[in-house]
Amino acid sequence: MGALEPAFARRGHSVVCASGSEAARVDFSAADLIVAGAEVANRAGLVTKIAAESPGTEIVLVGTTEAAVHPDVIEHLPRPLDVDRLLAVADDVADILDGEHLREPVDLVAYETLFAGDSPQIRDLVRRVRLVARSDAPVWIFGDDGSGRAVAARVIHDRSPRRTGPFVALNSGAHADEHLSRLLFHGDDAAVVRAREGTLFLERVGASGPITQRELVHYLETRSQDERSARLVVGARASGDSLIAPELHYRLKVLE
């Protein structure tokens, strides 16, 4: 990783390189972003240690997908390492922590309008929305009614690589089960068709019935076979709308 230090420095990032016993003595709380080899990090329990000691520090693992998967990691980069991608992640983290520095004025206005305030909670929310937007995994947004679940879903879409695609929203609580299923999955005007290459936001997913939930499970199981399939973002009340089938709960609870 030391060979990357000049590249980080050219982007204005301060870098500390450590390996072996040196890494064990690093003060993780002093870092905004830690980049580590996935295999070594997993063997040493490094991700769990960082998450416990410094939950505000973001983590990138470099290595095979199998070795890199971890819920506290914001980015998994395969080898050979895409240096430009890594630098882009570092830039994103720096932008969030520095209040964007007006680098993207349109986005800054949107964030100030939608997430007003500068409390640690708001800053953490903004950071997580920005980083979640990078992923293509399903997202589960919890919050009380009126807390801005749909707004957060829209911001995730607008900050994602899918932002040039459509954003389609449906409220599960507004439709009977069979009708919701038809709206989502059946016909040329189905929501999953209209949202291709974009984002499908399903509000109050817990209010959907068994027919819709079974079809959602099938969609999540098979969407990887279609590169143009919509990304699914769902909203739910903090206390839960109603019972959600375990198999759907498992497939949705990837990013929250």
Image (cartoon, helix red, strand yellow):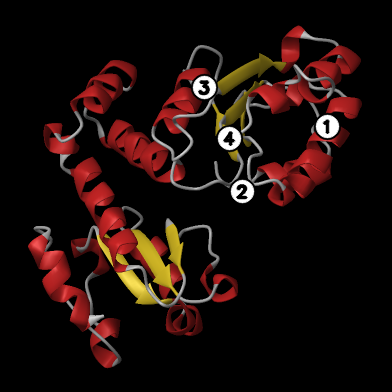
Q: CA distance from mark 4 to mark 1?
A: 22 Å
- Look at the numbered discs 4 and 1 and tell me whether their residues touch, using CB distance below 8 Å: no
Give me the C-alpha separation between circle 2 and circle 4. 20 Å
Q: Decide: marks 1, 3 in contact (CB < 8 A)?
A: no
Q: Quadrant of the C terminus?
A: top right
Query: Which residue is depicted at the point 20% across and 43% down?
Result: 95
Question: How much space separates mark 2 and mark 1, taking CA atoms?
Answer: 17 Å
Q: Earlier in the sequence, mark 2 or mark 3?
A: 3
Q: Residue at x 51, y 70 (%)?
A: 68
Q: Which residue is mark 2?
A: 254
Q: Amino acid at mark 1?
A: Gln
The amino acid type of the residue labelled 4 equals Glu
Query: Disc 2, disc 4: CB below 8 Å?
Result: no
For the residues bearing labels 2 and 1, Cβ distance under 8 angstroms = no
Residue identified by numbered label 1: 213
Between discs 4 and 3, the one toward the N terminus: 3
Amino acid at dot 2: Val
Q: Which badge, 4 or 1, comes first in the chain's sequence?
A: 4
- Rendering quarter of residue 24: bottom left
N-terminal-most mark, 2 or 4: 4
Cα distance between the residues tagged 1 and 3: 20 Å
Task: Assess whether mark 3 and mark 4 are in contact (beta carbons under 8 angstroms).
Answer: no
Horizontal placement of 82 versus 162: left or right?
Answer: left
Image-quadrant location for residue 124:
top left
Q: Picture coordinates of residue 234 (x, y %)?
A: 63, 29
- Please name the residue that numbered disc 4 is placed on: 197
